[in-house]
């Protein structure tokens, strides 16, 4: 496992792609991710929150899992959305549209934002099992988000509709893809952390609650546009950016 952790660490720093691990267990994958998370903290990176992955139960049987997965977010990979996104450091990036929650001092959501997570493969292709994704920190590359808005605890997040466009490609979805609601995804994350005896969610953490639409590939020179609708009493403003090499 240490060899795979080392290879994934080097791949994230710009090294060669890593052979896809095909017999890795989820337990081993989380151990590898934890090893590289400790490396990041040791070099001065700061954890900013968690990302929830694999939140669409309809796909679990085919993927050989029975629950969502999680990984870390970092301060140096999390930022306000800008007009342009440089893809020079990426192999084959994709973008996911998510509702991002920020936790208050009581560890409950106190703010929300529309978020675009950039994921990138450390492997030769995107065809790899869930454990391989977990071992690579959920293939997280960056999180870009819009302005924070106060969270309404009475809001019904079970009827969200979302759409994502990149160039001529388009995808749509909604709450059904995130365990029926971003709040249920958040609860599932808390349960998973407790089951693994991992660090519980902390005040001021941000949490990406799962992809509301299928991810779309990103290439230089494309415009990305995203929208989430269905938030009672408020509407998060659409986000957009243009990619560059």
Image (spheres, rainbow, N blue to C red):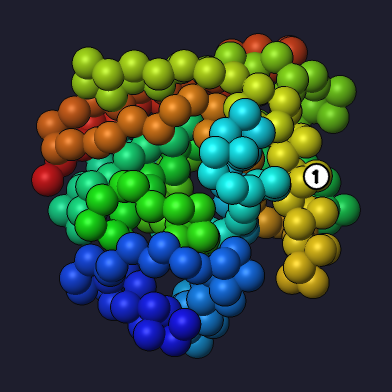
Q: In which quarter of the view is residue 203 placed?
A: bottom right
Residue at 76% in and 62% down: 193
Residue at 66% in and 33% down: 57
Q: Secondary structure at mark 1?
A: helix
> Residue 243 location in percent, x, y?
21, 37
Q: In which quarter of the view is residue 235 placed?
A: top right
27 left or right of 24?
right
> Residue 105 location in percent, x, y?
83, 56
240 left or right of 28?
left
Nearest the eye: 155 or 57: 57
Q: Is residue 57 visible?
A: yes
> Residue 73 location in percent, x, y?
53, 59
How many labels were placed on the picture? 1
Give the residue pinned by disc 1.
Answer: 187
101 relative to 106, above or below? above
- Neighbour tally class for label 1: few under 14, some 14-19, many 20 plus, Cα within 10 Å: some
16 left or right of 66?
left
26 left or right of 118?
right
> Residue 175 location in percent, x, y?
65, 23
Residue at 50% in and 68% down: 24
88 relative to 146, above or below? below
Residue at 70% in and 47% down: 67
Nearest the eye: 65 or 55: 65
141 relative to 167, above or below? below
Nearest the eye: 157 or 124: 124
Q: Is residue 48 visible?
A: no
Quadrant where the C terminus lies? top left
């Amino acid at each position: 496992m240490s060899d795979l952790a080392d290879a994934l660490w080097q791949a994230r720093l710009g090294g060669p792609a890593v052979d896809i691990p095909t017999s890795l267990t989820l337990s081993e994958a989380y151990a590898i991710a934890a090893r590289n998370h400790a490396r990041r903290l040791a070099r001065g990176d700061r954890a900013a929150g968690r990302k929830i992955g694999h939140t669409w139960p309809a796909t679990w049987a085919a993927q050989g899992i029975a629950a969502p997965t999680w990984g870390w977010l970092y301060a140096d990979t999390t930022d306000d959305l800008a007009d342009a996104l440089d893809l020079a450091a990426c192999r084959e990036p994709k973008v996911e549209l998510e509702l991002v929650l920020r936790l208050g001092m009581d560890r409950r959501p106190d703010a929300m934002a529309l978020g675009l997570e950039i994921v990138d493969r450390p492997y030769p292709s995107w065809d790899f099992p869930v454990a391989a994704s977990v071992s690579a920190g959920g293939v997280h590359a960056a999180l870009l988000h819009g302005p924070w808005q106060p969270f309404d605890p009475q809001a019904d997040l079970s009827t969200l509709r979302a759409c994502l466009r990149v160039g001529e490609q388009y995808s749509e979805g909604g709450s059904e893809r995130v365990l029926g609601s971003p709040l249920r995804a958040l609860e599932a994350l808390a349960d998973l952390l407790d089951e693994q005896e991992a660090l519980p969610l902390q005040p001021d953490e941000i949490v990406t609650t799962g992809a509301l639409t299928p991810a779309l590939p990103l290439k230089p020179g494309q415009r990305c546009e995203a929208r989430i609708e269905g938030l009672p009493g408020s509407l998060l403003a659409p986000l957009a950016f243009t990619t560059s090499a």
